[in-house]
Amino acid sequence: MKNKDNALNDFLTMIYQSWTYAKLTDKEKEKMHDILVCCSHLRGSWDARYEILNDLYYAFLVGLGYTPINWRENENTPLF
């Protein structure tokens, strides 16, 4: 069983390895981190907390214009 108090750290560890995080600017990374770390009001199980953090990150990406395919890709990149 996962410790619910580790949900934020576990989520951040996963996000830092994601391709979407790699495409963020340094300023966006800082803002995203600030948004997620301020979630001291997270309640519930590890799974519930992780899901809330995932929803917050997704909303942050949508606010940046995220699309699942070719987001922030060079226009010269071939489409497969």
Image: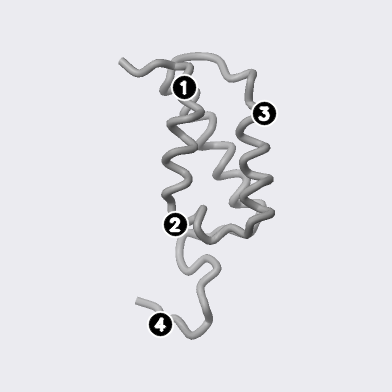
User: How dense is the environment of label 4, judged by Cα within 10 Å: few (below 14), some, or many (20 and up)?
Assistant: few
Q: Is residue 4 above or below residue 24?
A: above
What residue would you read off at disc 3? 38
Please name which of the two marks, 3 or 4, marks the residue nearer to the observer: 3
Mark 2 vs mark 3, CA separation in Å: 23 Å
Q: Which percent across, then down, holds residue 53?
A: 53, 32
Q: Earlier in the sequence, mark 1 or mark 2?
A: 2
User: How dense is the environment of label 3, judged by Cα within 10 Å: few (below 14), some, or many (20 and up)?
Assistant: few
Q: Is residue 53 above or below residue 26?
A: above
What residue would you read off at disc 1? 48
Q: Quadrant of the N terminus?
A: top left
Along the viewing direction, whichever of 48 and 74 lies nearer the viewer: 74
Mark 1 vs mark 4, CA separation in Å: 38 Å
Q: Quadrant of residue 35?
A: top right
Secondary element at tag 4: loop
Q: Earlier in the sequence, mark 1 or mark 4?
A: 1
Q: Earlier in the sequence, mark 3 or mark 4?
A: 3
Q: Assess whether mark 4 and mark 3 are in contact (beta carbons under 8 angstroms).
A: no
Q: Which percent across, then down, holds residue 37?
A: 62, 31
Q: Assess whether mark 2 and mark 1 are in contact (beta carbons under 8 angstroms).
A: no
Amino acid on which the number 3 mark rests in the picture: Cys
Mark 3 vs mark 4, CA separation in Å: 39 Å
Residue that appears at 59% across and 51% down:
61
Q: Which percent across, then down, holds residue 15?
A: 47, 44
Secondary element at tag 1: helix
Residue that appears at 63% across and 20% down:
40
Amino acid on which the number 4 mark rests in the picture: Pro
Q: Quadrant of the C terminus?
A: bottom left
